[in-house]
């Protein structure tokens, strides 16, 4: 019985990683950069919801909408100010370091505004918990919502990229920026759109993350962000279903090793598995091997 | 492509180690504030040099800015309150006290800088530092210079490893032993689960001593589950294991942020054991927006409860609220006691303000082992030569959203 409960909790944690990883993987796949500030955009989303629905007492749905708008605007602004000027820089490291800088900037600005004291987040999920097996297993509403929302978002994203014109443009930019530009695709607008979608996803991830684990500090997004990045690499960075599978696997492995091996060793085991997978399959589980032509 | 991924991975690992110590990194933002205080201190040092001998110069060090500022400011305010009271009542044996508090941002290096600033100010006695890691670093210096040091809240063992250093609070191991004894002697539970932070000295230190003492108290530890600074949001597995093992009580030698998550997750999964914690849980009721119903019945071992009904506590809480507009926590009480302990030791050791810091230190070292102080954090506190305090642990229980003293 407890195995099922560990598994469900693992899937719930994993779908949070998956949701965050979707943002990482989209930006990486299209803009070919790692947006390390992604986790902190989640934190900004969390604080936006906290202010609207807890401090001001407005309905949670309005809070989520506000968070989506704020995060989208923030993501696009960061891209315009901090990343775009560096897109043509000689070393891809420059933009990576800038992303880390933006991450610390966001954390410290939040620390300045909201202070270091922990805030308790009121859940925005209004799904009733489900009890199974004569009360042995309780699945919280947040768990159900997280799993359902991440599956829906993954499917929507895949449809968007396959079917819509903007999605096709993204695909083209990710394959070859120069050629896409020659074909009349507005590369800058496409990358901007990618950041907008990625940041909107971060806002939703923020809502679910803070509902499931209801504390909010300026560092809330940092660790889940990094774990989700690992999930994205695990599943094959750049691949949307890969990010999803990577996230779920990471959560399940983490929880099961905590339960059956050692709660102290859980993180070591998770990263050990990651190293093994990358040794066997360097592009991750669903990653495609691309031969770069010179 | 492959290169980029491995590069990014390496970076993410570095970043992880950075986030782990994110607190310290972020605190540099407030560096400007420190410079200001240092300037102010330099000014007051100038003004004070002529007056040497006329006043006792007590220095204080602690985090007044940054992530641990809650603790440092409480100590600063609590100590200032005691100093003002003593001065208003005529000082120590007729000598007024000057108190100078320096910011260390919870950073060992900055604490040593603050200590040097205070030395330039001709500090005679040090009341500090507030947090353990800086305290260990400063203790090295005070021992070298032979300046008497009394830390209100540095609970790690090495904080008082030298004979010139004493503390007001319990040491980490003592909290573990006292918790096990309290649970055992009051027959609160016999099957206990522990959830602790294996990446934190405070938490793992208490856990180890608790586990050792539990055996003597007939307490069975049915589950000992750890978490680390990198995974401190999801406690469902640890709680499930505690539940499956049939724990009647969950011991939480951790800080209140994680504890508040544990309480809410236990509630979600329908697990309702008794919860017992140490002084790290103090503050759980002041977490913004926390549903205090979740903490109902939680017991914690803390030296100070703001709602205790004795006159000393009532007067202190009222004066503190009037001066600073908030209810004092145990750090403020520790600091308030620390100043009165210094007063008692100074009186007992017949120390006068014209003595050198080294002579004062020698006199106070002896005096500390002979005095007995009734304070906010304990009645009849006495000290051993190794710097540890003897006092009865007090436990409080959370009832109707407030701390209530337990018998």
Image: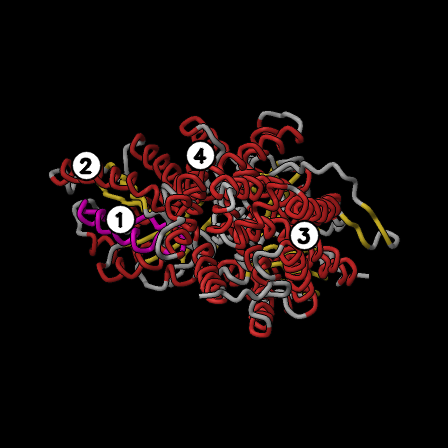
Badge number at residue B114? 1
Q: Secondary structure at mark 2?
A: helix
**Cβ–Cβ under 8 Å for marks 1 and 4:** no
Chain of the residue where label 2 is placed in the rendered structure: B
Residue sitting at the far right: A134
Of circles 1 and 4, the one toward us is 4
Of circles 3 and 4, the one toward us is 3
Taking the image as drawn, is residue B281 in sight?
A: yes
User: Where does residue B134 sit, x and y in percent of width and height?
Assistant: 35, 55
Q: Are marks 1 and 4 on the same chain?
A: no
Segment tinted magenta in the rendering:
B107-133
Chain of the residue where label 3 is placed in the rendered structure: A
User: Where does residue B280 sit, x and y in percent of width and height?
Assistant: 53, 50
Q: Are marks 3 and 1 on the same chain?
A: no
Seen in the picture, residue B190 relative to B130 is either above or below; the reply is below
What's the colour scheme?
secondary structure
Task: Check disc 2 and report the residue beneath it.
Answer: B44
In depth, the one of B355 and B220 nearer the eye is: B220
Task: Check disc 4 and report the residue beneath it.
Answer: A113
Task: Check disc 3 and report the residue beneath it.
Answer: A15
In depth, the one of A62 and B211 nearer the eye is: A62
Quadrant in the rendering for residue A233 = bottom right
In depth, the one of A166 and A278 nearer the eye is: A166
* Badge 2 density bin: few <14, some 14–19, many ≥20, Cα 10 Å: few
Screen quadrant of the C terminus of chain A: bottom left
């Amino acid at each position: 019985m407890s195995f099922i409960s560990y598994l469900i909790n693992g899937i719930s944690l994993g779908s949070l990683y998956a949701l965050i990883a979707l943002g990482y993987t989209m930006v990486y796949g299209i803009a070919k950069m790692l947006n390390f500030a992604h986790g902190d955009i989640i934190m900004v989303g969390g604080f936006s919801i906290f202010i609207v629905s807890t401090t001001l007492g407005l309905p949670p749905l309005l809070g989520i909408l506000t968070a989506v708008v704020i995060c989208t605007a923030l993501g696009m602004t960061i891209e315009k100010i901090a990343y775009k000027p560096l897109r043509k820089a000689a070393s891809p490291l420059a933009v990576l370091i800038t992303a880390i800088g933006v991450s610390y900037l966001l954390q410290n600005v939040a620390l300045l505004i909201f202070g270091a004291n922990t805030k308790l987040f009121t859940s925005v999920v209004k799904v009733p918990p489900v009890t199974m097996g004569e009360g042995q297993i309780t699945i919280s509403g947040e768990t159900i919502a997280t799993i359902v929302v991440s599956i829906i978002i993954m499917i929507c994203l895949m449809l968007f990229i396959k079917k819509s014109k903007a999605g096709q443009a993204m695909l083209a930019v990710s394959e070859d920026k120069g050629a896409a530009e020659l074909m009349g695709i507005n590369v800058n607008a496409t990358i901007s759109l990618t950041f907008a979608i990625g940041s909107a996803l971060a806002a939703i991830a923020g809502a679910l993350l803070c509902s499931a684990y209801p504390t909010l500090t300026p560092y809330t997004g940092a660790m889940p962000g990094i774990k989700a990045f690992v999930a994205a690499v695990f599943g094959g960075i750049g691949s949307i279903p890969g990010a999803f599978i990577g996230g779920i696997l990471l959560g399940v492995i983490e929880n099961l090793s905590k339960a059956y091996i050692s709660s102290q060793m859980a993180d070591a085991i998770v990263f050990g598995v990651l190293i093994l997978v990358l040794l066997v399959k360097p592009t991750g589980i669903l990653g495609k091997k691309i031969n770069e032509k010179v | 492509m492959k290169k980029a991924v491995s590069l990014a991975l390496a970076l993410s690992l570095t970043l992880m180690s950075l986030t782990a110590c994110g607190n310290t990194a972020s605190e540099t933002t407030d560096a400007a504030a420190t410079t200001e205080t240092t300037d102010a201190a330099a000014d007051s040092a100038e003004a004070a040099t002529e007056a040497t001998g006329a006043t006792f110069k007590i220095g204080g060090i602690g985090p007044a800015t940054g992530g641990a500022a809650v603790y440092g400011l409480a100590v600063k305010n609590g100590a200032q309150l005691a100093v003002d009271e003593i001065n208003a009542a005529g000082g120590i044996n007729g000598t007024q006290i000057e108190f100078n508090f320096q910011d260390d941002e919870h950073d060992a290096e900055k604490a040593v800088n603050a200590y040097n600033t205070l030395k330039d100010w001709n500090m005679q006695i040090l009341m500090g530092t507030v947090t353990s890691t800086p305290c260990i670093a400063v203790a090295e210096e005070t021992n070298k210079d032979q300046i008497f040091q009394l830390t209100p809240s540095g609970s790690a063992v090495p904080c008082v490893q030298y004979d010139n250093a004493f503390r007001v609070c319990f040491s980490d191991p003592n909290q573990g032993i006292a918790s096990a004894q309290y649970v055992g002697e009051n027959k609160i539970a016999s099957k206990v689960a522990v959830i602790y932070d294996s990446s934190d000295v405070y938490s793992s230190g208490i856990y180890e001593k608790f586990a050792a003492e539990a055996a003597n108290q007939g307490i069975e530890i049915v589950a000992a589950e750890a978490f680390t600074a990198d995974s401190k949001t999801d406690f469902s597995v640890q709680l499930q294991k505690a539940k499956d093992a049939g724990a009647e009580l969950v011991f939480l030698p951790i800080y209140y942020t994680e504890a508040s998550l544990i309480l809410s997750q236990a509630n979600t999964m329908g697990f309702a054991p008794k919860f017992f914690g140490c002084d790290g849980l103090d503050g759980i009721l002041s977490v913004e927006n926390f549903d205090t119903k979740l903490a109902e019945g939680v017991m914690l071992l803390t030296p100070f409860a703001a709602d205790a009904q004795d006159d000393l506590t009532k007067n202190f809480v009222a004066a503190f609220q009037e001066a600073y507009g908030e209810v004092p926590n145990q750090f403020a009480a520790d600091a308030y006691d620390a100043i009165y302990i210094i007063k008692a030791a100074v009186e007992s050791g017949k120390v006068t303000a014209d003595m050198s810091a080294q002579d004062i230190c020698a006199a106070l070292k002896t005096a500390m082992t002979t005095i007995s102080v009734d304070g906010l954090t304990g009645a009849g506190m006495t000290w051993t030569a190794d710097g540890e305090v003897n006092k009865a642990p007090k436990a409080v229980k959370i009832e109707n959203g407030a701390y209530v003293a337990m018998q």
